[in-house]
Image: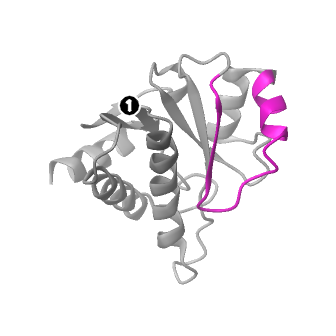
Amino acid sequence: MLQTQQADITQLDVDAIVNAANSSLLGGGGVDGAIHRAAGSELLAECRLLNGCRTGEAKMTRGHRLKARHIIHTVGPIWTGGKNGEADKLRACYTNSLRLAAGAGLQSIAFPCISTGVYRFPPDRAAQIAVESVRAYLETPCSIQTVIFCCFSEADQVRYKGLMEA
């Protein structure tokens, strides 16, 4: 089941939340910084052991002080005009995060709007890629029952609702 919520992703009680991380996995601004602050210093210590992450890939840690049991870290593409494989890299973020969650037998996962902040991916295009990627992945049998698109802004929530209802 696909859902959208306007909420603080660090407050969701799900099996996993997805962190729109930078390649170091050592914290940053936006969603990444909020997740690191809420999860506590234990998250930083665990992330140091992961040796970073490449764009489109995903790695999982424990949730530490969050309600979410796990955090799946994925690195979205930086928008440079759309001619450098940005759409495919963003699609890989969703697919690889879902693959990791399903491989661990998780049932619920929440995604933020990946790459639409300081990485400047156009929000409408990013949302379309997100919804299409998740729908395509869920067509194959897996443990995942609930996917939440967690939107920080009302505008993002309206955007995702429109795509999900189409």
Placement of 42 over or under 124, stated as above or below:
above
Q: Is residue 153 visible?
A: no
Residue under label 1, please give it: 107
In this view, the residue farthest toward the bottom is 83
Placement of 125 over or under 50, stated as above or below:
below
Image quadrant of residue 34? top right
- Residue type at mark 1 is Gln
Q: Nearer the viewer, residue 76 or 42?
A: 42
Q: How is the protein colored in the picture?
A: one colour
Placement of 23 over or under 47, stated as above or below:
below
Placement of 134 over or under 60, stated as above or below:
below
**Residue 47 within the magenta-colored segment of the rendering:** yes
Please give the range of residues in magenta.
42-63
Q: Mark 1 falls on what kind of element?
A: loop
Q: Residue at x 72, y 54 (%)?
A: 53
**Residue 143 within the magenta-colored segment of the rendering:** no
Q: Residue at x 50, y 62 (%)?
A: 92
Label 1 environment density (alpha carbons within 10 Å; few <14, some 14–19, many ≥20): some
Q: Is residue 147 visible?
A: yes
Q: The N terminus is located in which quarter?
A: top left
